[in-house]
Structures are given as C-alpha cells and as structure tokens.
Image: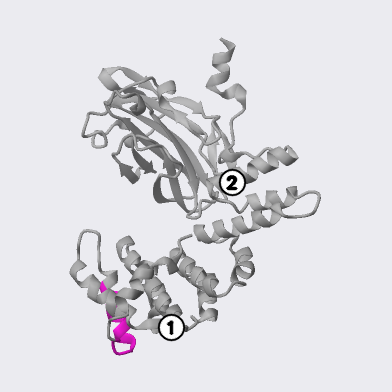
C-alpha cells in the first residue's frame, strides 16, 4: 500500500500559506474545484489555489476530503489524496494527533471509496502501532483490494511462525480470501509442498475455460476494431462464415487446460497477420449480477456481453498481464453470451507474434461470482472447471 506520510514536500508548500477562514464553505468550495478537474485540462488553472486553500484548513478538512474521493474522477481523486497527505503531515509536524476513532470508523466503513479507506487506515497505523493487529483480521474479506492484500499478508506471516504441527486448514481458509496472484501462488505452493494438496488456480481465479472459436477474419491495419464481422452481431455455432480472403471458417469448441486460462490462437486458428479471431462462451447466472470481465492479451481486443460492447482497446504487444483489461457489465438471469474479438497486426518481429488471450469472470474485488456458471455442452459447470478430457480436441488428436 502507498505510504501517504511520504509526501514531505507538500507540507513545506502549504506551511507558508495564511490560514483561510474556517467554515463549511472554505472546505466545500476548494473540494468542488478539485473534483471538477479533468485529465483533459478542464479547470487546471484553478487547481493549485484550490488545493492550497483546502490544505490550509488543516484537520477540519481531513474527513470531508477523504469522503470526496468517493465519486471523484481519477485525476481529481489524485489531487484529493495528495491533499489528505499534506493535511495529515502538517498535523503530525505540529504534534497534533489525528482523530483516531474517526479514522478507524472510516477505514472500516464499506460505504467509502476503497482508496480513501486505505488512506484512513495508513494514517491510523502511522500513529497507532496496535491498529494493524486490531483491524487487519477484519479486512480479510474486504472489498478494498489493498486492505485485503495487507490482511492476507499479515495472516500468512503469522501462519509461517505458527508452532503447531499442521497449518493446512488455516492455509486453505486463507486461500479463500486471497485475490492477488502472487499471494495465491505462494499459498498454493506451500499447500502443495508441505501437504501435497493441489490448488486449482483456474477455479480460484474463475477463468473461463470452455470457448467456441472462429477465425481468421480480415483486420486491416489501422482499423482492426472498426471492421465488423458476423460474430459481433450474432453467434450461431453451426453457421458457416466468410473469413479472411473469402475462406470459409467455422466455429469450433476448445477447452483450455492452461492453469491461467490462456488460449493460444496461433495454435488453434493458425498464425496470421492483420487478422481477427472471435471467442464465445455462455455464462449462466441465477439472477441479475454485476460482473467484471478481466482479460490479459498482447493484442487489440473488444469485449461484448449479450451484444453490448463493454470494452475495447487497440493496442498491440504491450505484454499479456492478467487483468490488464477490465470490462464492466451486468449478467442477466439465465444464459449470457460473452464474445471476445482478438486482433493481430502486421508486425513481423519475433516478440510481436503472440496471438492469445485469457479471460476471467469476477466481482470488483476479483472474487468468483456466486450463482454464476459456464455452459459446457449442455451442462452447467463451475467457472474455471475443465471438461472431461475425452471431450477435448487434445484427446482426439492424441488418438490419431
């Protein structure tokens, strides 16, 4: 987590300012200005004076500023976080303790923005060394990714020092709370090494494992995402389609057995340049559910859910980190059609040849969604589960 009290230079900047008259308006007005700032430059000229005026209000402005982060755009939220850091450091420098009870209540309050709650927790922990031991256990299942990560790290550290013969049950329970890849891998590795207990990373992260894939389609340089093909309109799995160069292409089922759900399109469709491929999956929800479709791919992509475009980015060969792209939408009750469009450009360098993707389905904290399954054939299966090997393409090829 970020350390707010490291912003030393900010307090030096505001220490020479005369204090503005206290009062609700003296705090509300500069906050309103800061929240109106945008990356494109809107109201940028007013930011400096507003920020200084807000920080000059001291401790009285601390909690209104923390609360304001809740609905601020990323640029405005950054200014507000800097203001929180400067206010806090000025109080510390003046030997005035921050309101510990209010900070604790704020950090524990799920109605506030996760990033603001992290700031409140860090400020409290900086002046109260007992706060981590008291609060972190309550953050194990927290919607704030940073607070959850800190809680899992603290618990893992305690388990590693435990004197009892077996901590397998404790590790398995802790794994249910872990969401960050490195922490999940560390716990899974320890379970495997010390207790021979295998963890399905595919299921833990809720990677979609069963896809129907079709391609290649034309994807001309500079307009890959603007060339619209049939799968973006409707998915009919037994339909014959006209692909790149007029060649006939068909949908084919594919089950990935990669632990992180990676699908290699070079292997499944063939190596192509200036090409697009589509992957479709059926997600089944017991009720209407908010969802995040998180993807990793080094290629340009579009994400569609029930015909609605959730996300797109035309960017190539930037790496394929897990969760690099996030599309946000809602699953309706019943069957939902997820369609991905993955585009390859025309670069020929060795490092540009990857054409692949991984996708997982989760909530805002990266947790699997209860009541949501994927359709494999005619059967509902847990997200991340693998079809019996006899049903996969790999087995058919092994029999040849």
Q: Which mark is residue 234?
A: none
Residue 51, above or below 138: below
Is 30 colored magenta in this rendering?
yes
Residue 331 horizontal side relative to residue 139, left or right: left
**Which quadrant of the view contains residue 228?**
top left
Q: Position of residue 140 (x, y in %)?
A: 60, 60
Tell me the SS state at disc 1: loop
- For the record, the magenta segment spans 19-33
In the rendered image, the residue lying farthest to the top is 400
The secondary structure that dominates the magenta segment is: helix
Q: Position of residue 171 (x, y in %)?
A: 69, 50
Residue 293, above or below 48: above
The answer to the question of whether label 2 and label 1 lie on touching residues, with beta carbons closer than 8 A, is: no
Identify the residue at horizontal 54%, vertical 31% (top origin). Answer: 258
Q: Position of residue 167 (x, y in %)?
A: 75, 50
**Which residue was labeled with disc 1?**
94
**Which residue was labeled with disc 2?**
184
Tell me the SS state at disc 2: helix
Q: Nearer the viewer, residue 251 or 147?
A: 147
Q: Residues within 10 Å of mark 2 (few under 14, many from 20)?
A: many
Is residue 319 in view?
yes
Q: Residues within 10 Å of mark 1 (few under 14, many from 20)?
A: few
Residue 141 horizontal side relative to residue 66, left or right: right
């Amino acid at each position: 987590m970020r350390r707010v009290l490291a912003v030393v230079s900010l307090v030096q900047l505001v220490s020479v300012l005369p204090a503005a008259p206290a009062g609700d308006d003296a705090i509300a007005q500069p906050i309103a200005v800061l929240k109106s700032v945008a990356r494109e430059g809107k109201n940028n000229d007013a930011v400096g004076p507003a920020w200084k005026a807000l920080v000059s209000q001291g401790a009285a402005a601390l909690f209104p500023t923390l609360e304001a982060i809740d609905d601020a755009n990323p640029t405005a939220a950054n200014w507000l976080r800097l203001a929180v850091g400067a206010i806090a450091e000025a109080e510390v420098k003046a030997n005035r303790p921050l309101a510990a009870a209010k900070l604790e209540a704020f950090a524990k309050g799920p109605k506030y923005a996760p990033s603001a709650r992290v700031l409140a927790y860090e400020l409290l922990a900086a002046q109260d060394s007992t706060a981590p031991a008291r609060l972190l256990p309550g953050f194990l299942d927290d919607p704030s990714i940073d607070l959850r990560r800190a809680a899992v790290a603290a618990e893992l550290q305690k388990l590693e020092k435990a004197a009892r013969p077996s901590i397998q049950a404790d590790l398995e329970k802790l794994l249910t709370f872990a969401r960050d890849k490195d922490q999940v891998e560390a716990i899974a590795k320890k379970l495997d090494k010390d207790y021979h207990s295998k963890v399905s990373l595919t299921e833990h992260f809720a990677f979609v494992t069963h896809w129907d894939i079709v391609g290649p389609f034309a994807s001309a340089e500079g307009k890959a995402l603007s060339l619209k093909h049939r799968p973006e309109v409707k998915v009919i799995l037994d339909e014959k389609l006209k692909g790149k160069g007029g060649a006939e292409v068909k949908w084919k089922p594919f089950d990935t057995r990669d632990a992180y759900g990676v699908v290699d399109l070079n292997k499944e469709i063939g190596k192509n340049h200036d090409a697009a491929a589509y992957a479709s999956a059926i997600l089944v929800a017991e009720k209407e559910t908010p969802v995040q479709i998180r993807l990793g791919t080094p290629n340009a992509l579009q994400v569609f859910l029930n015909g609605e475009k959730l996300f797109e980015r035309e960017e190539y060969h930037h790496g394929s980190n897990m969760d690099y792209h996030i599309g946000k939408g809602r699953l309706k009750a019943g069957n939902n059609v997820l369609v991905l469009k993955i585009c390859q450009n025309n670069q020929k360098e060795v490092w540009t040849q990857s054409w692949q993707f991984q996708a997982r389905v989760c909530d805002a904290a990266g947790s699997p969604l209860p009541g949501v399954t994927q359709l494999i054939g005619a059967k509902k299966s847990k997200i991340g589960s693998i079809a019996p090997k006899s049903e996969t393409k790999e087995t058919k090829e092994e029999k040849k």
